[in-house]
Amino acid sequence: ALGTGACRQWPVIDGFFFKTVTALMELKDHQKAKDLLLAGPESLQQKAPYWYDLACCQCRTEEIEEAKKSIKECFDQDQILRLRSLYDPDLEAIWESLGNI
């Protein structure tokens, strides 16, 4: 796939990872999106969208406790994403927990 190939070829360009992850999630391939995030460069972990997208994938792959940890890391880095999370259907499995995170 073009997106995953670009991620391997230019791993320092975060945009390739996030756009490819978004495309995979839209295609409902949450496992592949999660795998791509986890295989990405460590520098991605310094960005709140990494943790947000990972939490979304983890919810969709029924890794609920891991999703809660990931969304907490996201909120620690960027509180603005908290509001978005309340309406994101990918995070529906942890909506009730968000007030405690």
Image: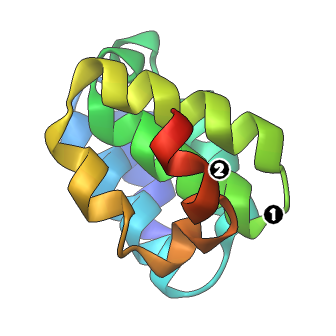
Mark 1 lies on residue: 61
Q: Nearer the viewer, residue 63 or 30?
A: 63
Q: Residue at x 67, y 68 (%)?
A: 30
Residue 11 visible somewhere in the drawing = no
Tell me if label 2 and label 1 are in contact, CB under 8 Å: yes
- Residue 79 relative to residue 26: left or right: left
Mark 2 lies on residue: 34
Residue 93 visible somewhere in the drawing = yes
Task: Give the amino acid type for the residue marked by disc 2 in the picture.
Answer: Lys
Q: Which label is found at residue 22?
A: none
Q: Residue furthest left?
A: 80
Nearer-N-terminus badge (2/1):
2
- Residue 93 relative to residue 20: left or right: right
Task: Name the spot of residue 79 as percent of width and height, x first.
Answer: 20, 33
Q: Residue at x 41, y 75 (%)?
A: 23
Q: Residue at x 34, y 30 (%)?
A: 75
Q: Secondary structure at mark 1?
A: loop
Task: Name the spot of residue 20 as percent of width and height, x first.
Answer: 39, 62
Q: Which mark is nearer the camera, 2 or 1? A: 1
Location of residue 26 with respect to 34 vertically, above or below: below
What crowding class fits label 2: few (fewer than 14 Cα within 10 Å), some (14-19), or many (20 or more)? many
Q: Nearer the viewer, residue 31 or 62?
A: 62
> Where, by quadrant of the figure, is residue 52 drawn?
top left
Task: Give the amino acid type for the residue marked by disc 1 in the picture.
Answer: Thr
Q: Residue furthest bottom?
A: 27
